[in-house]
Image (spheres, grey):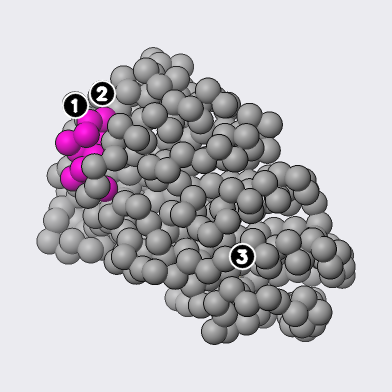
Amino acid sequence: MNPKGCIFLEEGINFESNSVTDCCISHNDGRGLPVIFKDYNGEMIDWEKVFEIKAQRVNAQKKETIYDCDGCYRLFDYQFKDEKKISEFHFSHSRVCNAKCIYCSDEYSSGTTNYNTYPVIKDLIEKGYYKAGGEATMQGGEPTLMQNFEELVDLFLQNGTVVRVHSSAIKYSQKVAEALSKNKGSVVISIDSSTNETYKKIKQVDAFELVCESIKKYVEASKDNVIIKYLIIPGINDNLNEIDGFFKLMKSLGVKKIAVDIEVQYARKHENKYVSPHIYLLHDYFEYLAKKNDMELLTYSFFIYVLRNRKISKMRFMSNKFFFNLVLKHHNQKEKNIMYCR
Ligand code: SF4
């Protein structure tokens, strides 16, 4: 039998605001994110050192599950390849953003960290440690504001890596559109609203029209690779009018893929606010409207937990405590939930 393992442990690199790690997964009360370098700020990397650190961890993992990975839902029976190659990239380091979402941590919406990873990845390729066929996920902050973002996307496109971008779409990226049109990438955009007024309440910036224009252009590049997300925020967009308007807007922009989730960060930040008692019905309504408008509906992870809860208990008034516990449960659970990683 193969030992348990994970592609990120062997072939992954994740850039954080002040460190480099194997993956961007945090689980089980602080495990995960196996550290490669601490106190990192965009310096050029000694790749031999990276593979030395990775080999030590992989060899330990082959004997027994290591502390960082113990309990992680990404751990499978895994055939280690013992190559000195990186194929999976995560860019989680940017703390610069062009929105100020009410649910986001201040660290992300008002930070300044934004070091340049383009020369680092170029160096990896030039030194022969790069492996095509993997994925590069860009999140943030707002990834399109990362230094040399367009060049970085281009580098991946030229070298056979699929690019996944989580963007506010306030800034449009020609290179992301190119990746979508070539079926070499996807973009997830959380608009959470159907009007300028609601958008401003949630994002705290005046950019609704810009976002709609970007969505339209991305959809023109590829309908299949654009996902527009609606995070349900108690007391702000958890009403049928807003959801009706959202579907009308999506239809007018040509969107085919919708994602829905419950915004748990907001629930955690606002202890005294109660989450909509009709949360299950909202999901039913999303399903109904997606079907009616011939759209694909993706339900993301926190909503999946809530829907499971529906099967075991009658509809009830859920407090933020419930959602806080849900977050803990999510971080402690061991089953696969690939959806959340996308
Ligand atoms: S098993 Fe989990 S914690 Fe370990 S490297 Fe893979 S994703 Fe990261």
Which residue lies under the disc numbered 1?
241
Residue contact at pointers 1 and 3, CB within 8 angstroms: no
Q: How many badges with numbers are in the image?
A: 3
Q: Which residues are magenta?
A: 193-203
Q: Position of residue 180 (x, y in %)?
A: 61, 34
Q: Amino acid at mark 3?
A: Thr
- Distance, label 1 to label 3, CA atoms, is 43 Å
Between residue 148 and residue 108, name the one nearer to us: 148
Q: Which mark is residue 244?
A: 2
SS for tag 2? helix
CB at disc 2 and ligand 1 closer than 8 Å: no
- Residue 267 seen by the camera: yes
Q: Which mark is residue 117?
A: 3
Q: Amino acid at mark 1?
A: Asn
Residue contact at pointers 2 and 1, CB within 8 angstroms: yes
By secondary structure, the bulk of the magenta-drawn segment is best described as: helix
Viewed as shown, does residue 271 lie left or right of 40?
A: left
Viewed as shown, does residue 325 lie left or right of 79?
A: left
| The N terminus - image quarter | bottom right
Above or below for 243 versus 328: above
Q: Amino acid at mark 2?
A: Asp
SS for tag 3? loop
Q: Position of residue 118 (x, y in %)?
A: 64, 61
